[in-house]
């Protein structure tokens, strides 16, 4: 059995390519923790924790962790049937070499189910996990991470970085006297899951709306309530707006919602102009435009 903090094949960029995968292109996961579960055909206890415990962990950590099930199978048709039957929402891989798989040998897999957590550095962080141990270990690992990393520098610097990276800008518009601003800064922005999500997807900046460059941004974006959080493109156009304090999970949900073009300000404006007057849509549209809760 490999030891903790020992490198394994997951460190190599081409680790996934010997495997069969029916869901399209597999990305590179060097910035994520990876949860590997090993399963063999006809093994009920291989799928049972996947269907119950791992699905709970997946729903909680899917924005910070990549989940993979590796099937020790040698029958492609049966493997595909299993995938159809269980329909798990994460990657399911096999090299169709069953117990002779070189990857299984590299991990010294002698029985299933088995589970590993691989760190962003390619090192094994936890192994032989069962049921709730998956969630417990992920909580421990992510707790050791960092919150949102805000860039220093000017707003123009952020625009240039957004242009170079293709990322949106996340702008925190706050004031020194705002109680929800302080709550978000000390509890939500320091949350490891929040930090991983925002650091992965955005150029993060924050400005005091009553000082320096913040005063210009206050006028430019018409902020009336604090905190106001904006998603901006590389040209400085507003894509989405969230106001007020929220818990970590809700805040990620609201920001993720704005990453969908249909929920952006431009997308909602188009829906309104084409005659959409559905009550829930109007409520969200007014809240987004006006920075108020209705």
Image: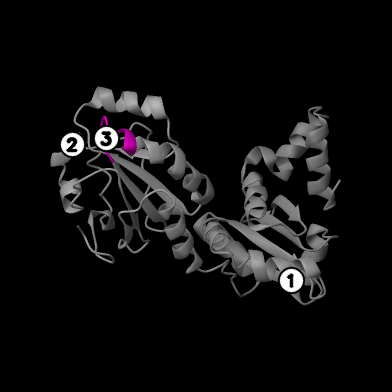
Vertical placement of residue 191 versus 24, above or below = below
| Residue 215, placed above or below residue 56 | below
Q: Is residue 89 above or below residue 208?
A: above
Element class at badge 1: helix
Q: Which of the two discs, 3 and 1, labels the residue nearer the N terminus?
A: 3
Q: Quadrant of residue 71?
A: top left
Q: Is residue 166 left or right of residue 78?
A: right
Where in the figure is residue 100, as x and y percent of width and height? 13, 40
Q: Of discs 2 and 1, which sits in the foreground?
A: 2
The location of residue 285, given as percent across then percent down, is 79, 41
Task: Please give the range of residues in magenta.
Answer: 39-45
Q: For this view, does 115 lie left or right of residue 229?
A: left
Which residue is disc 3 drawn over?
20
| Circle 2 residues within 10 Å: few <14, some 14–19, many ≥20 | some
Q: Is residue 26 magenta?
A: no
* Closer mark to the observer between disc 3 and disc 1: 1
Q: Residues under labels 3 and 1: Cα distance?
A: 48 Å
Write down the quadrant of residue 212 in the picture: bottom right
User: In which quadrant of the rendered view does residue 269 lie?
Assistant: top right
């Amino acid at each position: 059995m490999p030891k903790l903090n020992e490198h394994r094949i997951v460190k190599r960029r081409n680790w996934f390519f010997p495997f069969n995968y029916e869901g399209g292109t597999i990305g590179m996961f060097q910035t994520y923790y990876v949860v590997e579960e090993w399963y063999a055909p006809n093994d009920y206890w291989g799928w049972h924790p996947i269907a119950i415990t791992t699905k709970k962990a997946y729903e909680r950590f899917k924005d910070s962790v990549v989940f993979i099930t590796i099937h020790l199978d040698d029958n492609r048709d049966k493997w595909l049937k299993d995938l159809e039957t269980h329909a798990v929402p994460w990657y399911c891989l096999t090299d169709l070499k069953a117990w002779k798989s070189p990857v299984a040998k590299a991990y010294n897999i002698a029985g299933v189910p088995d589970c590993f957590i691989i760190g962003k550095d390619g090192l094994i962080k936890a192994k032989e996990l069962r049921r709730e141990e998956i969630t417990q270990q992920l909580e421990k690992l992510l707790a050791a991470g960092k919150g949102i990393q805000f860039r220093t520098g000017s707003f123009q610097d952020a625009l240039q970085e957004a242009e170079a990276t293709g990322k949106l800008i996340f702008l925190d518009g706050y004031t020194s006297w705002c109680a929800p601003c302080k709550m978000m800064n000390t509890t939500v922005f320091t949350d490891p899951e929040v930090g991983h999500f925002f650091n992965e997807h955005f150029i993060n900046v924050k400005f005091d709306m009553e000082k320096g460059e913040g005063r210009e941004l206050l006028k430019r974006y018409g902020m009336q309530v604090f905190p106001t959080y904006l998603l901006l493109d590389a040209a400085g156009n507003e894509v989405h707006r969230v106001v007020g304090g929220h818990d970590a999970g809700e805040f990620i949900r609201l920001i993720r919602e704005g990453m969908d073009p249909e929920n952006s300000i431009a997308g909602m404006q188009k829906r309104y102009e084409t005659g959409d007057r559905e009550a829930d849509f109007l409520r969200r549209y007014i809240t987004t435009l006006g920075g108020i809760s209705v």
